[in-house]
Amino acid sequence: MMTIIQLGIFVVCVVLMAVQFKSLKPEYGIYMTIAAALVIFFYSLSKIQVIFESINTLKKYVNLGGYMPVIIKIVGISYISEFASDICKDSGYGTIGNQIQIFGKLSILAVSMPVFEALFKTIDGLIS
């Protein structure tokens, strides 16, 4: 398992190599950046098991009802959209990166609407 120190050293080495290649073949720098981003992403996935175990422990203490899948979807959407957006921006396609961010935000809003509906029903029940 890669630690944060090893990951940091790896990323710095990749960035330094990408900067060297940028003047010769700019596309190689982009490929190296994308490869490093994918390595980081897949090592990040290894932490998901720990997160799910913690979430299951929290479920025992807090009654979240059916909202836990919604929370997990929101976190997943935010990470994936940020990851894809950053790759587009680093590759020089900032406009597409911004569109991905907007789509991610709208997706989060759509997924979270049942939570808002339940919140407003609860508030309405307290007021009535």
Image: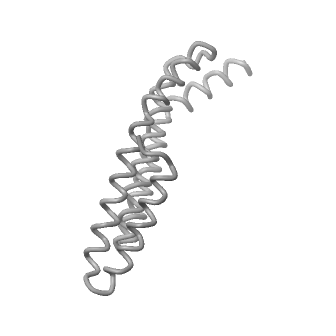
Q: How many marks?
A: 0
Above or below 101: residue 1:
above
Q: Tell me the colour scheme of the image.
A: one colour
In-front residue for pair 36/100: 36
Residue farthest along the bottom direction in this orientation: 23
Quadrant for the N terminus in the image? top left
Residue 66 vs 78, above or below: the answer is above
Comparing 11 with 50, the one in front is: 11
For the point 63% across and 14% down, the residue is 61
Looking at the rendered image, the quarter that the C terminus falls into is top right
Q: Position of residue 15 (x, y in %)?
A: 41, 70
Q: Position of residue 49 (x, y in %)?
A: 43, 29
Across and down, in percent, residue 9 comes to 46, 60
x and y percentages locating residue 118 in the rendered image: 57, 24
> Quick check: 51 above or below 88?
above
Residue at 30% over, 60% down: 35
Q: Residue furthest right?
A: 127
Residue shown at the point (46%, 32%) measured from the top left: 72
When the figure is inspected, residue 76 is found, relative to residue 61, above or below; the finding is below
Q: Residue at x 39, y 64 (%)?
A: 97
Q: Quadrant of residue 86?
A: bottom left
In the picture as drawn, the residue positioned furthest to the top comes out as: 60
Side of 30 where 47 appears, left or right: right
